[in-house]
Image (cartoon, rainbow, N blue to C red):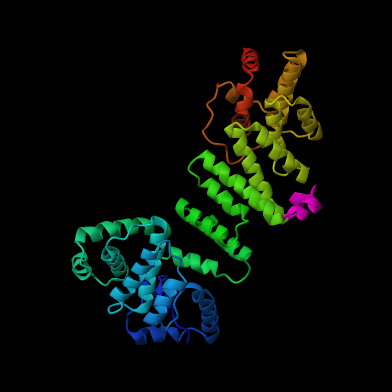
Amino acid sequence: MSKIGRNDMCPCGSGKKYKKCCLGKETSAVESIMQLVTKEEAATSEAVAKKQESAARPEAKLTLTKLKKMASRDLKWEHPAHEQLALHLIETMRESYDRELIWEGLVLWNGYSRHVKPAVKKMGSFCAAIEFILSEEYGFLQTQANLATKHEVTAPTISRKVKEMLNYIEQYGMGGAEEELLLLNVSGTPKDQEQALLQKAMETKTSNRRIQLAEAALEVYPDSPDAYLILAEEAENESDARAYLKAGMEAGARELGEVFFAANKGHFWTLSETRSYIRISKSYADSCWFSGDAEEAQKVLEQILELNPEDNTGARYLLTAAYLYTNKLKKTEKVLEKFGKDAAATVAYDRMVLEYKKNGITSQLKMLYRVARNVNKHVPDYLLGIKRLPHNLPDFVGIGDANEAIEYVIVHSRLWTSMPDLVKWMLKQQD
């Protein structure tokens, strides 16, 4: 018969975890349920449990000595004082709690201390808060007054620490650090561990947890462009985001290597391992453009087109805008000629801008404007302020629809604000 872990689903079929359901009830009742489990199911469950729990969870027969070794060996601490508190926590809980519950307290303290980095003045205040939270979780009915006496601190202090820890738990969960340990102990290469952490980050909604998982991925696999992309997405400002994107692009280049670049130039997108590098390079170019660094954006976009001439990511659209903005008209013509059959609004309106920059207001310009409006009639409304632009780019874009117009105007706003006379001319065409 396989042993049920505290965090396993209860075999009674309630849908709850064992620790919140049948743990502590009559042993005979649990055993009678377990008799319904087939030998094959039990063997499978035991194999999975051993593979996962051996990485970060304590063994079934856990001694205090083993607990102390695991606290020092398996958990990473930001400060020696935090590790000392962990060992003190073991001593304060050893008489009243089973070893698995003490381990959960250690995991909670490890995750909390790594993120909050608290100064430890009185160990008792943190130990009491951890003990109270676990007591509430498992129904031991400990009061803050009793714990204040036990740990020689005041009840208001415990209440304050409990509130701080609950804020952490709300974002990361009780087992945040333990979950990370499980992921880091996935069998395989550092790349496998990185992929496991990134997959979890994709499934996570909270910003802080996504950052934590991305940073953990970089610890085991420093050349992870996708981890840097997550950090960029969660950055507090555009400058920090751009720095992460650049670092991610450099990491992707290291991961692939110079030989790979030379051997596969021209058909990069057909190789799945290049997608992360191409995507983060495009994101970095976008960031440079919006921050005003058109030259840097051009350099990156040109490289993307060299590596991937078919341009599956649409680098050409921003590249023509950057060329036109910096008056590199011959380069603009080459891109537009190469993708001349493209039905996108970007191509139609950029042809119009090119004509204006080359020859000013001409009959050819009027003809190109009519053609552009036939391609997407919504662009002038947003460009001229007749309709209000949303704050963000649309999630989906269709040829000729309003979303395409919104995307074009937002991305090309820097270009159009540099040509006030052309905008005035367009306004007159509305009459």
Q: Is residue 261 magenta?
A: yes
- The x, y position of residue 403, in whole percent, is 60, 34
Does residue 407 appear left or right of residue 59 in this picture? Answer: right
Res. 267 visible in picture: yes
- The x, y position of residue 277, in whole percent, is 67, 50
Where 310 sits versus 69, above or below? Answer: above
Res. 399 visible in picture: no
Q: Which residues are magenta?
A: 257-271
Of the pair 402 and 420, the residue shown nearer to us = 420
Of the pair 173 and 370, the residue shown nearer to us = 173
- The x, y position of residue 151, in whole percent, is 23, 68
Does residue 331 appear left or right of residue 163 in this picture? Answer: right
Q: Is residue 400 magenta?
A: no
- The x, y position of residue 374, in whole percent, is 71, 25
Residue at point 43%, 61% (across, down): 78
Of the pair 72 and 330, the residue shown nearer to us = 72
Counting the numbered discs, the total is 0
Residue at far front of view:
80
Give the prevailing secondary structure in the magenta stretch.
helix
Does residue 368 appear left or right of residue 90 in this picture? Answer: right
Where 12 sits versus 255, above or below? Answer: below
Residue at point 57%, 46% (across, down): 244
Question: Quarter-wise, where is residue 75 in the image?
Answer: bottom left
Residue at point 70%, 34% (across, down): 319
Question: Quarter-wise, where is residue 77 in the image?
Answer: bottom left
Of the pair 4 and 113, the residue shown nearer to us = 113
Q: Quadrant of the C terminus?
A: top right
